[in-house]
Amino acid sequence: MRRRALLLSLALAFLALQMSPVLSQEVAREDTVIFDFDRTVADPTNFNPFTPAGTTNRGSGAHQAMWEPLFILNYTTGQIDPWLGLSFEPNETQDVWTLKLRDGVKWSDGEAFNADDVVFTINMLLNDSTRTLANAADMQRHVKSVSKTDDLTVVFELNGPNPRFQVDYFSVRIVNSLLIMPEHVWAGQDPLTFTFYDTERGWPIGTGPYTLTSSETNRFVWDRNDAWWGAATGFMDLPEPLRLIWLSITNEETRVQLISNNEIDAANSVSLAAFEAIKARNPSVITWQDELPYAWADPCPRQLDINTTVKPWDNANMRRALSLLIDRSEIVDIAYEGTTSASVSMFVQYGSMQPFIDAVVEAGYAVPATADVAAGQALIEAEGWKLNNDGLYEKDGEVLSVEILVNNASTEYTRTIDVVVEQLRAAGIEAVARPVDNSTYWGSAAPSGDYEVAYGWLSCASVNEPWASMNRYTAQFITPIGQNAPGNNNTGRWNTEATAAYSEIVAQIGALPLGDPRVPDLVAEAYSYIHAETPFIPLVQASKLLVFNTTYWTGWPTAENSYNHPAFWWNSAHQIIHNLTRAK
Amino acid sequence: MEQTSPVPVAAIESAPTLQKPKRVMGRFNRWDTPWLNTKLLSGLGILSAILLIGLIGPLIWDTSLALTRAAPRNLPPVGFTNWRGQEGVWEHPLGTDNNGRDMLAVLIVGAPNTFLIGFIAASVGIVIGTILGFCAGFIGGVVDDFIRLIADIVITIPVLMVLIVLQSAFKQIDIQTMALLIAAFAWPRATRQIRAQVLSMRESGYVRMAKLSGASTFDIMFKEMMPNLIPYLFASFIAGATGAILAAVGLETLGLGPQRIPTLGSTIYNAIRGTALSLNMWWWWGLPSLLLATMFIGLLLVNLGLDEISNPRLRQASKS
């Protein structure tokens, strides 16, 4: 008995020892914000944001809490909000850009953040002969040299005029922006293999108000650094949350349960029905708009990309027929339950894009919301296809079929394609969906052109000007089938005389400064080739029905309180975190 | 003598004599065959009822309603209301799912598809298993070693994992392909079981007699031994079908099944992905689950019934 008691007390003492560090770090739930993270991270100890493994790790809180961007594009005002950078001005010819940094910015280890870090990071990317580091190819394409004039000023000499240099790479235009790394840690490291993770040395570090406490494949914890530079310099107060957690949630049912029970504070996009279920159980949840469509449209409109090298879709008339057979409003009604709207062009339908969308519409190149089955069938029949007894088109004994590649990561995607498949079948095309997982879709199938038709958002890029999206279909990106298209651009290998003509006009647009009055007409002119050859088919605007919980935290971005968009997985989420206030 | 003899005889033999003639008579009673046991009959009844849904259903119900966008979305069954307060309508008596598929049509289309997968996979499995099992058990020697080795290797492969990999490698999966994929892993168990039976049967008198009378190996295997194995093969077939349906439903519930035409498993998968549990859309996951459960009970009863036929001891036990 005595021996057993001794063993028991030893075990208890051991347990207590094990528990004590955990207990000492306990943070109250009302001081913690828990974000939904829609994926798991294969290697939670890689914080190198430039390697492919590390890039997946950014959204685990790293670039929302620890790494701050230089600037943040404000979707509401259309302006670029300064953050670590104060200003970024081009010369008259748009080929020399001068970056002014904010004074007093410090890394979380106390070292100053300055022009040396910027020059070091850009040179690291310029010197990457493999061009595999994130942003390396972009920087090498645009930047001739980078130098510092003083501790807070950096001058970029570009290879040619680029009016979008700041917005494209340093302003969180979409999801990411180029992150500046601390020279005093990264110097001498091999950027291709460095993991930037060493708990004993306090790595990773950033300039943000939070530092990493723990990282696991499905859970990342960040605690507030009360010595944050921003509070010391008067840039901003310390954010209120003491702790931020990113929790992997990979299915909607779990998401619904957790936010209904106040176990998370921000949930990724859910379906309308799921939102209704949450709202019924937890009245303190809110979303971007408080009535239909509830959702926020992210800048990636959904579309079908067509592999223009595969018969019979190498024929532009057949591609136009496909587009005519699709009823976009039905996709909105069924797959989105009314939480989005039909696309009229390749562009995201934000106010800042309206002049360019209007130009496309006025020129008569808009895609209609409803299908014109008769016109679509007429185009198919003109190519010699005839309806057989099964109601499917047939030519030379071959049935007209199409296989649509779809990423099965979200029901949004698969439900859309379920509807498209039935629409095409009803019109006489034997359509089938080919669902693949996220890594197959982005890793090989889409970029290598291993598809007939691919559902996705491959024209996503433009937010406040048209060039970024249009440039993705230019001839410079044409790659043989089987090789990955650079940057997933022109994955459908659109390569005709029209592509060449289109690319020339897009290049002209690219050289004009932002807001130049000649741009809308040029957009319409370039779009005539897209309309005629239909290398892709715009479907609907994206819909993110993000759910925020006001039980513990208020100040979430909404259409009424739109200090910026609500994408809390983007590098711009610093703004959201700074706006949160404790509810009780 | 005349007075005493009938009384004790009757008294002594009353119990046995009452049963004996019955049992003797029973042999001539065409209804008293082991094939007509309650378990087998009720199992077959359940399975036929489900099959009938698939056979008669398309005649009285429009099965094209099982496809996306065929009906209004999220409707509950008649007599119930959904979370939006919508009531069920007779046009869709069992309700609809979130993509506008009519649940009755889904069940009518899905149930026979699920059966079909089980049937094809088990048939292929049992045919291969029988041939290999007989060859291994009867011929023996190197043939036995070789077949046993392959079967033992295949049997150790974690089937579901391989199937998941195979399914994702195939660009398109239809019901037949899926059944054949499952069949590729269904034969080793049947092979081993049949081999064991053949081994014990090989030494029985009638097989020896057949050997002595010069019957060919083929004749002995398939004319002499096979008929005695029929109930056993049936039971094996049913077990195989159960396993195949289970594997198919497992794959479908993981989202790896056929895409467009609904199966019971893919309907459950869609329901899980569509937050049916949180929305209390019980008709979406509940009805296919209920049908699957009934199907498995039917298969189990058939299996137990067949077991009784091939194993007379069980028959006696269940009668007493």
Image (spheres, coloured by chain):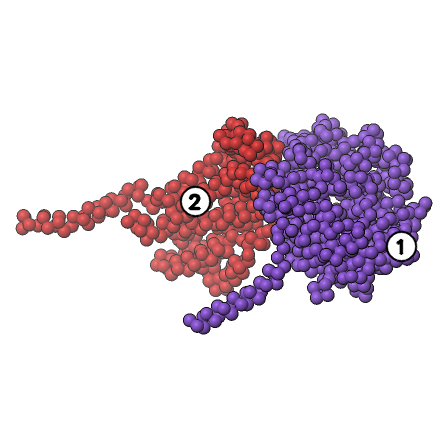
> Disc number at residue A153?
1
What's the CA distance linking mark 2 and mark 1? 77 Å
The percent coordinates of residue B216 (x first, y second) are 43, 56
Residue type at the position of mark 1: Thr
Q: Which quadrant: the N terminus of chain A?
A: bottom left
> Disc number at residue B163?
none
Picture quadrant where residue A536 is located: top right
The residue beneath circle 2 is: B297
Query: Crowdedness of circle 2 by 10 Å Cα count: few (<14), some, many (20+)?
Result: some
Please tell me whether mark 2 sits on a helix, a strand or a loop. helix
Taking the image as shown, residue A505 lies to the left or right of residue B257, namely right
- Count of labels shown? 2
User: In this structure image, what is the colour of chain B?
Assistant: red
Chain letter of the residue carrying label 2: B
Taking the image as shown, residue B21 lies to the left or right of residue A282, namely left
Residue nearest the observer in this picture, B173 or B1: B173
The residue at the point 65 percent across, 51 percent down is A31
Residue type at the position of mark 2: Ile
* Residue B68 can be seen in this image: yes
Residue nearest the observer in this picture, A83 or A334: A83
The percent coordinates of residue A399 (x first, y second) are 67, 36
The residue at the point 51 percent across, 48 percent down is B246
Chain letter of the residue carrying label 1: A
* Residue A178 can be seen in this image: no
Query: Crowdedness of circle 1 by 10 Å Cα count: few (<14), some, many (20+)?
Result: many
The percent coordinates of residue B79 (x first, y second) are 49, 30
Q: Nearer the viewer, mark 2 or mark 1?
A: 1
Tell me, by letter, which chain the rendering colours purple: A
Would you say the residues marked 2 and 1 are in contact, meaning their CB atoms lie under 8 Å apart?
A: no
The percent coordinates of residue A196 (x first, y second) are 74, 61
Instruction: Say yes or no: labels 2 and 1 on the same chain.
Output: no
